[in-house]
């Protein structure tokens, strides 16, 4: 039987009727995306629980996933059986001292949350400790990318071998996997835009600064998406954040024809899209990931769901160089070293970190909870075990990558099907002046008073420190640094020396103009009369 004719295996197939005999034990669903994990947990287990008059707690790690599961449970008329909530909500209830009702089954969906989120979520261990201590419920640990965590559960004897169900992700829809360097990204994107007029591109960025860099280059040619809770005000503004609703713009939409897609040719997004949001669009043919974390990387690659056998795409994965890997190791080890000393010998730990600058250093450690006292009996220091385990796992992978290289280790985690399709891409990189691209992106647009500080920051990105945000200061800086290379200048008046005032009642999209009657500048090239 050829690969293309192979019958798809679903989670319900490999479990069969086993679920009927589960009783107060751990179960692992180590299955790739699109294998029917949610269908089994909601439809099969949900209806079984309904008939048995039992209850299910369904835990999600993202708002989008929670909404999707809630809507599915509502459609199946199972909301009286299945309580859909988030790990974060469960954590708050536990911390607030609220009693958590008993559930016969608890579905810990996308449970890689306990590792991937551990580095930025202070309390992942609260919900983890709750789940690991449950003795009177069936706990289903569900994920496509929690290989190390699942191995740990098995090694610790917390889950029986017969309760581990595994289906590898089907990547037959992937045409090719390319590894590229950081500075090659825009050249590859530009080549796709120029030579393939219909295909769409998704780029998973690893930082707010990388998103901002891409925004300077592509401006309104692309859609941008991030979490509404992002710490970067600039990033949220780029993604259409509304301070009243406290939400970013919904650039990903459900279409009448069944597609779930975005409007523009490119979507730049953070890892907030790594699960819970499925993209369905045949035109999405290129998926880039600059995410270093292996679990999140694999999640990001799995966001596209195919619509038929002709729906194929190409993956592009950024390679991290030894210098970057060493930098990440240094960050990890700085976090791990005091925690390991604390676990090994509190006396040595206090001697090393009990006084001076190092005491303050420990107070900022991301694995510890808050402060500690000289007498251990009064110490309030506590180790976030989820975060500690994540840092240790990451550091082990970093050590392997340093020895063997980033790509060989990635290929191991990607699996045979993807690694057999992988190769390096050779790109003739065009050197791009990102500040020049930023200037081009704002040419001819009204620039209001609140835009001036951002323009000043952009000058600083090329090493030009400006004390003021006046129009003469900006134009003087352009003259000094670009002279004949860039002819546009900032103007506050029109050709007749009349002050520029925005008189538009409505914007192009039909909404009221919030800047009506405000003065503005414009960046353009004018030919002055002799």
Image (tube, rainbow, N blue to C red):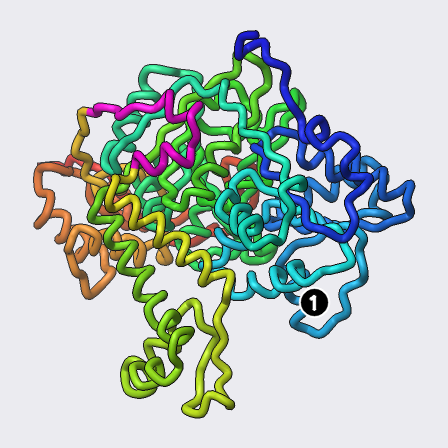
* Residue under numbered circle 1: 93
Q: Which residues are magenta?
A: 407-427
The secondary element bearing badge 1 is classed as: helix
Residue shown at the point (36%, 65%) measured from the top left = 336
- Residue 193 picture location, percent across and down: 35, 22
Residue 510: x, y in percent?
Answer: 56, 37
Q: Nearer the viewer, residue 266 or 475?
A: 266
The answer to whether residue 115 is left or right of residue 232 is right
x, y percentage for residue 195? 33, 15
Residue under the image location 35 percent in, 66 percent down: 335
The C terminus sits in image quarter: top left
Q: Is residue 339 above or below residue 451?
A: below
User: x%, y% of residue 13?
Assistant: 71, 26
Q: Nearer the viewer, residue 340 or 356?
A: 340
- Which residue is painted at 35% across and 41% down in the image? 215
* In the image, residue 319 above or below residue 23: above
At horizontal 23% and vertical 42% (from top left) the residue drawn is 321
């Amino acid at each position: 039987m050829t690969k293309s004719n192979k019958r798809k295996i679903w989670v319900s197939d490999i479990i069969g009727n086993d679920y009927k005999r589960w009783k107060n034990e751990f179960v692992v669903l180590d299955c790739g995306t699109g294998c029917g994990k949610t269908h089994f947990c909601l439809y099969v287990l949900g209806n079984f629980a309904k008939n048995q008059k039992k209850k299910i707690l369904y835990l999600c790690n993202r708002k989008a996933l929670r909404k999707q599961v809630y809507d599915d449970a509502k459609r199946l008329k199972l909301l009286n059986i299945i309580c859909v909530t988030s790990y974060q909500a469960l954590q708050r209830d536990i911390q607030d001292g609220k009693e958590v009702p008993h559930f016969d089954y608890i579905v810990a969906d996308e449970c890689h949350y306990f590792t991937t989120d551990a580095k930025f979520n202070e309390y992942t261990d609260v919900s983890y400790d709750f789940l690991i201590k449950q003795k009177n419920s069936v706990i289903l640990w569900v994920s496509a990318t929690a290989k190390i965590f699942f191995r740990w559960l098995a090694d610790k004897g917390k889950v029986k071998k017969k309760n581990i169900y595994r289906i590898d992700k089907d990547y037959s829809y992937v045409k090719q996997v390319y590894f590229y360097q950081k500075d090659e990204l825009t050249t590859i994107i530009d080549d796709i835009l120029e030579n393939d007029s219909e295909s769409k591109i998704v780029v998973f960025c690893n930082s707010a600064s990388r998103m901002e860099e891409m925004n300077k280059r592509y401006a309104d040619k692309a859609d941008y998406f991030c979490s509404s809770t992002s710490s970067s005000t600039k990033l949220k503004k780029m993604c259409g954040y509304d301070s009243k609703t406290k939400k970013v713009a919904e650039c990903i939409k459900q279409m009448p024809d069944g597609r779930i897609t975005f409007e523009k040719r490119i979507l730049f997004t953070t890892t907030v899209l790594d699960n819970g949001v499925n993209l369905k669009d045949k035109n999405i043919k290129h998926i880039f990931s600059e995410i270093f974390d292996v679990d999140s990387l694999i999640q990001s690659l799995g966001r596209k769901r195919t619509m038929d056998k002709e729906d194929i795409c190409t993956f592009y994965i950024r390679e991290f160089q030894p210098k970057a890997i060493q930098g990440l190791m240094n960050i990890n080890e700085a976090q791990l070293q005091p925690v390991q000393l604390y676990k090994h010998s509190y006396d040595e730990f206090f001697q090393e970190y009990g006084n001076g600058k190092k005491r303050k250093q420990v107070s900022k450690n991301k694995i510890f909870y808050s402060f500690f006292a000289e007498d251990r009996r009064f110490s309030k220091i506590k180790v976030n075990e989820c975060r500690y385990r994540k840092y240790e796992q990451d550091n082990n992978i970093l050590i392997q990558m340093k020895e063997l290289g980033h790509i060989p280790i990635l290929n191991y985690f990607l699996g045979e099907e993807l690694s057999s399709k992988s190769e390096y891409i050779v790109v003739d990189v065009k050197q791009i002046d990102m500040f020049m691209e930023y200037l081009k992106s704002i040419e001819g647009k009204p620039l209001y008073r609140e835009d001036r500080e951002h323009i000043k920051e952009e000058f600083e990105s090329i090493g030009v420190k400006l004390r003021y945000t006046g129009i003469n200061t900006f134009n003087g800086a352009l003259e000094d640094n670009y002279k004949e290379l860039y002819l546009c200048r900032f103007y506050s008046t029109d050709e007749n020396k009349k002050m520029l005032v925005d008189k538009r009642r409505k914007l192009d999209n039909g909404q009221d103009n919030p800047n009506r009657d405000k003065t503005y500048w414009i960046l353009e090239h004018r030919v002055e009369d002799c």
